[in-house]
Structures are given as structure tokens and as C-alpha cells.
Image (tube, rainbow, N blue to C red):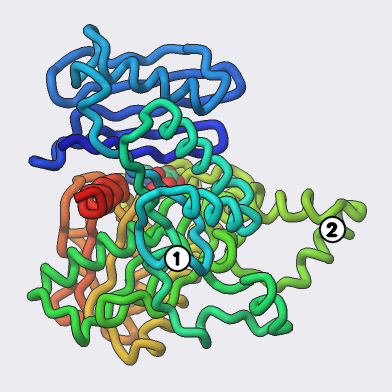
Amino acid sequence: MNVLVINAGSSSLKYQLFNMETEAILAKGMCDRIGIDGHLKHKPESNGKPVFNESIPLPSHAEAITVVIEKLTSKDYGVISDLSEINAVGHRVVNGGRKFSESVLVNQDVVDAIEACARLAPLHNPANLMGINACQKLMPGVPQVAVFDTAFHHTIPDFAYVYPIPYKYFKEHDIRRYGFHGTSHRYVSAQAIDYMGGKVEGSKIISCHLGNGASLAAIKDGKSLDTTMGVTPLEGVPMGTRSGSIDPALVDIISSLEGNIDLKETMDILNKKSGVLGVSCFSSDFRDVETAAGYDIETGHKMEDKPVNELCKLALDIFCYQVAKFIGSYIVTMGGVDAIIFTAGVGENSPYARFGIIERLNGIGISMEEPKNRFRGLGKFVDITGKDSMAKVLVIPTDEELVIARDTLKIVK
Ligand code: AMP
């Protein structure tokens, strides 16, 4: 059975085709600049055929999916002989609102409900729906499954998800903490629990998904107890370009400092010009910022002969400090911790960030073995726990697409 996984953004669409007997990736790729001009990178993984990496007109998501299917089945770049070899499609959907606590088979009610949540995720849900609609048109009769970023966090208790603002916003408008990166937190925390002997009951895990977007989750008894992102993915730790949690009065202050710009422009500053980029005045990419701050991105060590860009160093310090602060607060709310997980682009690849975060937890007995930490992008599970550390420190590569494919298989079966 083959499952096609689709992650549709507003102008991009990533895909992976899995053979679910072996969980091998048959092909993967990305359509970019949809609705602008169009570009496709398609990579067959199973048969040594060449990569297709060219500009190609992609006026809409429907055209993008048509082109993807054409490539998946083509003589030169294909991995399957025809469309009938795609048995199901799994879609990433960013916000499932209050309705979806797990993945579901897509029908009209589900489409309507995803549409209804679009006001909570105006940049993401409409794009995810475009992917679903396009697949329904091109592959009628092929089951489609929606997998929600928010679903894993449905176990968060009300005292952690209701904001201390007038209650009517929650009651009448569903404004609450939803949290994101749920498929990633679910996947890596399950691996950590397996690694520590498989006992779910009583387990206390803190998962740090640190990429361009970043969030932490406190996972107790295998269930999400709290997470740093909120009603939108702007809340929590500082990110590549997002501020994370700040004094809400800054919205008003920034607007007046910029000459009374409107709310949308002010929110753009917090979403796109803040975080590591905002403070460093240099880049949102951790590799650039670490190098400019004088650190070797392979080892995380200071390069003695290199000049230090002080703002880059400050941006990294703010990031590591805030992540460590949230870890500390989750240790309190869970009453302890068995394992801290690092995952996603920065978590898996940056010895500097891992060291900078764990160093700040040394005072409460959490440590890592520095030499074991000196790696990036190994793509495998690595235990970097220090000798007398009171909690494990684990680097676990995330795989959101595989989770979507597995959920899809389970539901379709
Ligand atoms: P993601 O959003 O999960 O793809 O993560 C993207 C982030 O991971 C970017 O900020 C990258 O700079 C960062 N990243 C990738 N490799 C490294 C590395 N070797 N050192 C530091 N950051 C890295």
C-alpha cells in the first residue's frame, strides 16, 4: 500500500510517497512559488532515476498536484506506473481547532470544520484545504486523511489553555492555547519513552522542537500537558523571525514608534522581523548567526581567531535562556523530568544551542556529555546525557511525514 503525504503551504507544497509495507520513501519533492511562476524539485528515492529540479508553471495548487502525479508516474522520473498505485493521501492540517483531537478521514463535514477553523490559522488552513480539494478532484475515490498539528495538545488541561482574558473570547470564539508541532512532539516523545523502557504511565518528557519555528511541550504519561505555542504559532520561545512571548503592550508601543502603523503591519514586525533576526540584525538562520557570533557550527566551540558579532551572540543568548526557562517551568509543572529531547533543524544540528540550553540547567542537576554533543545532522537517535544528570538528554530526529503516513494507513485500514 502506498500513501502520498501532502504538506500544502500558501505558495508551496511538499510531498512524500511512502511504501507502507516497508515505510520506505519512494519519492519526495517540493513545489515552490505556486501562483507566482512555479518550480518543482522531485527526487525519486527508490530506483536511481534522476532528480527533476526545474522551473515549471504552477498557477494553482491543483496544477501543482497534477504535476506531482505526472512526475510520480512518468517514465523518466517516476516510481509508480499509474495513479491507481496511490492508495491513500495524508494531509498535514495546521489547526483543527477544538473539534479534532485525532487524525480523521476527510469528508464534507471535516472540510467544513477545517474551513471554520481558518480564522484561527488564516495563513495555513486555507492552503491545507487547497491541497485537500485538489487531491479530491484528481483522485476521486482515493481516501484522504487529515492529520492536525494541534491534535496532540488536546489533552492540555483548561488551566493551561484558557488565557487570562475575558472568558467570552474562549466561550464564544474558541480563543485558547492550541499548540502546534503536535505530530513532531508525539513522534519524538514516543521514541524517548520506548528508549527508556516503554513505561508510558508516570513518564515525564520535555520535547524541544527547535527549528525556524520552535515550540516546547511538557508530556506527562505520554500526553501533552502544556506547550509553548498558543492560539497562534507566535507565542512561546523566540524563533528565527518570530518574537515568541513578549509584553502584549509592545504591540501598541511598536505601532506608535513606527508612526502609528496599523495592527497588521505591527503583527508583521512580530512575526517576520523579530526573534533571532530582529535582535541579531543579521539573519534568522542559526548557522549564519552562530558563525557570526564566532562559533564553529560543527562543534559549537568558540573560534578564538574569529571576530564576534555581539548582537548575534546576544540573539543566541536570548534564545538559549528562554528555552532553558521554559524547560525549568515545565519541570515544576510536571513535578520532575525523565528526559529532555532536542529535535528539528536547530535541535538536531546545533551543538552550540544544545550546550547553551543544557548549561543553564546544570544548577538543577541536568547535564550532557560535551564530546558526545559535538555533531550535527547525523539523522539518528543520540543519547548525550551527562554522567550524573538527573534526566536524560536526547537528540531525536523528527519525522512528521512518517507520522502522517502511519496515521493515514491506520485510518484507511
Ligand atoms: P527547520 O525549521 O526545522 O527546518 O530548522 C531550520 C533551522 O535549523 C535554521 O535556522 C537552520 O539554520 C538550522 N540549522 C540547520 N543546520 C544547522 C547547524 N548546523 N547549526 C545550527 N543551526 C542549523
Q: Residue furthest bottom?
A: 335
Residue 173 visible at all: yes
Q: Quadrant of residue 340?
A: bottom left
Q: Earlier in the sequence, mark 2 or mark 1?
A: 2
Residue 354: horizontal and vertical position, in percent? 33, 62
Q: Nearer the viewer, mark 2 or mark 1?
A: 2
Say which residue appears at 31% left-offset and 76% top-offset.
223
Q: Is residue 293 left or right of residue 167?
A: left
Q: Amino acid at mark 1?
A: Cys
Q: Residue at 20% x, 46% y: name it.
A: 379
Alpha carbon separation for disc pair 2 and 1: 28 Å
Q: Identify the residue under disc 1.
A: 320
Which residue occupies the foreground of this view, 321 or 82? 82
Q: Please state which of residues 238 and 248 is positioned toward the viewer in this rendering.
A: 248
* Residue 245, image quadrant: bottom right
Q: Amino acid at mark 2?
A: Ser
Residue 243 in the image: above or below residue 7 = below
